[in-house]
Amino acid sequence: MKRSLAVRDATTRSSLRQAFHGLGYEVIPFKKTEQSVLSCVPKDVRLTVTASPAKGQDATVDLAVALAGHGYTVAPHLSAQQVRDRAHLADVVARCRAAGITDVFVVGGDPAEHPTEFRHAHDLLVALHELDHGFTDIGIGGHPEGHPTASTEVLFQALADKAPLATHITTQIVFDPAVILAWARELKRRGIDLPVHVGVPGAVHRQKLIRVSGGLGIGESAKFLKKQQSLLWRFFVPGGYSPDKIIKGLAPHIGKPDNAIEGFHVFTFNDLGPTEAWRQRTLADLA
């Protein structure tokens, strides 16, 4: 993959360096994920573990606890459709506390076969704050391109409702930097001032994306594949996909007062080796 993230402007380079030193990777709780992380990912890379509808909430917490035990900073996803009730939530919080986990990411999730006590992410956030949860970083999701089941106004209102209960927003994957920037500016205009981490796919190989997009029950981060495959292929370079175009499009706007874009969150689809190699090349480009 060619080195295409060279940036001449000193201020932009500085912003990107800072963003890449704070980059986070999202992983899916599969059987070999723990070993793959240990083999490929340095301990200073923040991790999140997606909530897998097929495996349930506890599989997410199991992997998060294991990775925290290895010295990683890790945030499990908590899904309103997978946390059964307040007792289950209290158990999850207790397990995270015992493992020293201080970060969490709260999502709504797809409706489950067996309804839970929580209808939406906001319900789960409220219940979480009624506990002595101990989390210092609580993320929520953003949808710059909208959502098929909710209007734009409903989505912005939902973010406004959740924002006082959270510390940052991570977006779903969007391929157009202009769309992301316009959405981030609208957040700021509406007084929703949480830092925004823009979701991008990692440097994922074609075959991995094809396998992942054909899989079921792997969580929020893979849904975009089914919806945006025709657009996705335009972003491939020989060997795989590169997120450089999205990042270069947004780099000049990081830290500007009209938006709260702070950095990037990488959906790795467990293709950790190529993604980490891409991160290291980028840091070398920006040095």
Image (cartoon, helix red, strand yellow):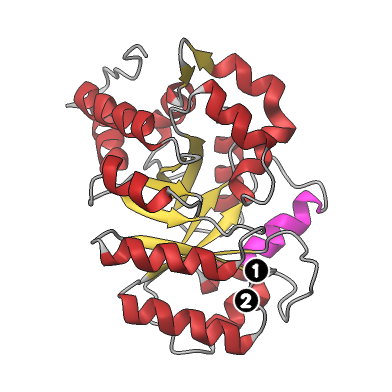
Label 2 neighbour load within 10 Å: few <14, some 14-19, many 20+: many
Residue at the limit of the structure toward the left, as seen here: 287
Query: Which of the 4 image quadrants contains residue 119?
Result: bottom right
Q: Which residue is mark 1?
A: 121
The residue located at (32%, 75%) in the rendering is 99
Q: State the CA–CA distance, disc 1 to disc 2.
A: 5 Å
The relative height of residue 27 versus residue 133 in the rendered view (above or below) is above
- Report the magenta residues as a range: 150-161
* Nearer to the camera, 79 or 126: 79
Magenta stretch, overall SS: helix
Rendered-image quadrant of the N terminus? top left
Instruction: Determine if the magenta segment contains residue 248.
Output: no
The amino acid on which the numbered mark 1 sits, given as a three-letter code, is Ala
The residue located at (57%, 59%) in the rendering is 51
Q: Which residue is mark 2?
A: 124
Horizontal and vertical percent position of residue 270:
46, 41
Q: Secondary structure at mark 1?
A: helix
Label 1 neighbour load within 10 Å: few <14, some 14-19, many 20+: many
Horizontal and vertical percent position of residue 33:
42, 49
Q: Is residue 278 left or right of residue 78?
A: left
The relative height of residue 190 versus residue 172 in the rendered view (above or below) is below
| Residue 267 visible in the displayed image | yes
CB contact under 8 Å: marks 1 and 2: yes
* Nearer to the camera, 275 or 40: 40
Q: Is residue 225 left or right of residue 26?
A: right
The amino acid on which the numbered mark 2 sits, given as a three-letter code, is Leu
